[in-house]
Each structure stands twice: as structure tokens, then as C-alpha cells.
Amino acid sequence: MSKLKVLTQDDLATISDDFGEILESEVSKALPAKEIEDLDLDILLNYENNQLDVDVDVGVSFDELSEITQEQIAQAIDEAYIKFDSYIDENFRV
């Protein structure tokens, strides 16, 4: 695996925005939109010593009749991380 390039503040802002879009897309694919009342994504990037750590907190408010499980949400987040890893490899590795 190639090395992560030195990231600027602009890079980190772009990464955060793009990961938010990836997350939103994966959650939307995995969960029925009509059952989601609110989706809140909190993305925390920590970049130190040329290491990038990304944590995410996904808050989902459901329709009261929803049958969405935490497992479905976790699976969507896992898929988003897989796509995010590819995104980082394609755009921020040297």
C-alpha cells in the first residue's frame, strides 16, 4: 500500500465533505427513505503524524412504524468505510 500524502486543511475539508456524501449515499441505499425522518452525520477527522483517523457517528430518526435495525445501519456504515478507503487510495496516496 502506498503512503498517504501530506494533507492540507483544504484536503481534510474535502475528505470530510466527500465522506459525508459517501455515508449518506450508503445509508440511503441500505434503508428505506420513507422510514427515515432525520439523518445526522458527525464526522471527526484526526490527522497527526501523517496518519488519518476517521470516526463517524450516524444518528437516524425513524418513522414510528419502521422496522430498520441497528444491524442495517452498521452494515451501511461498513460499506461506506470500504468505499471511503478506495476514495482515499485513489485521491490521497502517493
Image: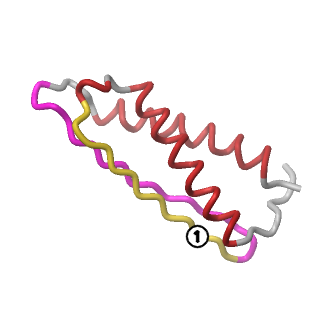
Instruction: Determine whether 59 is above or below 73 in the image.
Output: below
Q: What residue sits right under mark 1 in the picture? A: 46
Residue 70 percent coordinates (x, y): 29, 36
SS at circle 1: strand
Q: Main secondary structure of the magenta part?
A: strand
For the point 39% across and 54% down, the residue is 57
Residue, far left: 64
In this figure, which colouring scheme has been used for the structure?
secondary structure
Q: Quadrant of residue 28?
A: top left
Q: Quadrant of residue 16?
A: bottom right
Instruction: Determine whether 44 is above or below 66 in the image.
Output: below
For the point 36% across and 30% down, the residue is 72
* Left or right for 4, reference 78: right
For the point 80% across and 60% down, the residue is 4
For the point 33% across and 50% down, the residue is 40
Question: How many numbered discs?
Answer: 1
Q: Is residue 30 magenta?
A: no
Residue 90 percent coordinates (x, y): 79, 44
Instruction: Determine whether 14 is above or below 32 in the image.
Output: below
Instruction: Determine whether 89 is above or below 16 in the image.
Output: above
Q: Which residues are magenta?
A: 49-65
* Left or right for 36, reference 76: left
Towards the viewer: 26 or 73: 26
Label 1 is placed on what type of residue? Asn
- Classed neighbour count for the residue bearing mark 1: other residues with Cα under 10 Å, few (<14), some (14–19), many (≥20): few
Residue 80 percent coordinates (x, y): 54, 39
Quarter holding the C terminus is bottom right
* Left or right for 88, reference 25: right
Residue 33 percent coordinates (x, y): 31, 26
